[in-house]
Amino acid sequence: MKLIELKQVTKTFNDGRKKIEALKQTNFSVEEGEFVAVIGPSGSGKSTFLTIIGGLQTPTEGQVYINEEKFSELEEKKRAKKRFDEIGFILQASNLIPFLTVKDQLRLVNKINRSNFDKNNAKALLDELKINELSDKFPSDLSGGERQRAAIARALYHDPSVILADEPTASLDTDRAFEVVEILGRETKKKKKATIMVTHDERLTDYCDTVYVMKDGVLSKK
């Protein structure tokens, strides 16, 4: 089942008189349980590609489907709701809220979608990521690797179909970077997510099922 699909998607910006093709026509899909890496130099279009999939930008042409439903054509309010329900984001900086404990980072998800805190799910997830003993700690008390594990927990907690990871290991040392990517790969398979990781570190792609290269707005399989 395709959880992510792009059909003839392009993204063009106007810079004065000049037209910039940030993303040339792209057809792309990711199946459930598939872990995909996108590599390429800075300015190649990787971030544009990821933000279009995440609904933070809309394509100039073409359509984005999430979980086999139209996504990019939704009006902003509906797109924001679907983004919250279906997509988990993991960023280079863990983006944890500094005054909330690890457990409360998850509780915040419930407050946003007005649901009850799922204590058993939270504990199982934190146990699986080996940070349950840190559930009452604040981000400042955690190492870089622990903060990224907490960010992964927050991204997975509401059970989204899609995980988008933008340079999730850039601030980590080599050992922690491999550890985090291994966790992402394992969780993708176990929970049948579609995961896309943008990275500059090609060593990390050994954990991925498929590797794509972005160059000058053109996406191709490596």
Image: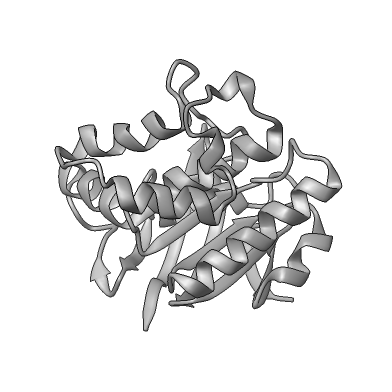
Q: Quarter of the image for the N terminus: give it.
A: bottom left
Q: Is residue 117 above or below residue 210?
A: above
Q: Is residue 102 left or right of residue 40?
A: left
Which residue occupies 53% across, 25% down?
137
Residue toward you, 85 or 150? 150
Location of residue 104 (image quadrant): top left
Which residue occupies 53% across, 76% down?
34
Residue toward you, 149 or 81? 149
Q: Is residue 157 above or below residue 31?
A: above
Residue toward you, 138 or 30? 138
Q: Position of residue 90 (x, y in %)?
A: 53, 45
Location of residue 133 (image quadrant): top right
Name the colour scheme: one colour
Residue 88 can be seen, yes or no = no
Total count of labels: 0
Which residue occupies 38% across, 55% down?
59
Q: Is residue 44 left or right of residue 30?
A: right
Residue toward you, 131 or 43? 131
Q: Is residue 112 left or right of residue 4?
A: left
Residue 142 can be seen, yes or no = yes
Q: Position of residue 215 (x, y in %)?
A: 71, 60
State the residue lying farthest toward the front.
133
Which residue occupies 61% across, 19% down?
140
Q: Quarter of the image for the C terminus: give it.
A: bottom right
Q: Is residue 175 above or below residue 37?
A: above
State the residue lying farthest toward the top.
99
Q: Position of residue 128 (x, y in %)?
A: 53, 57
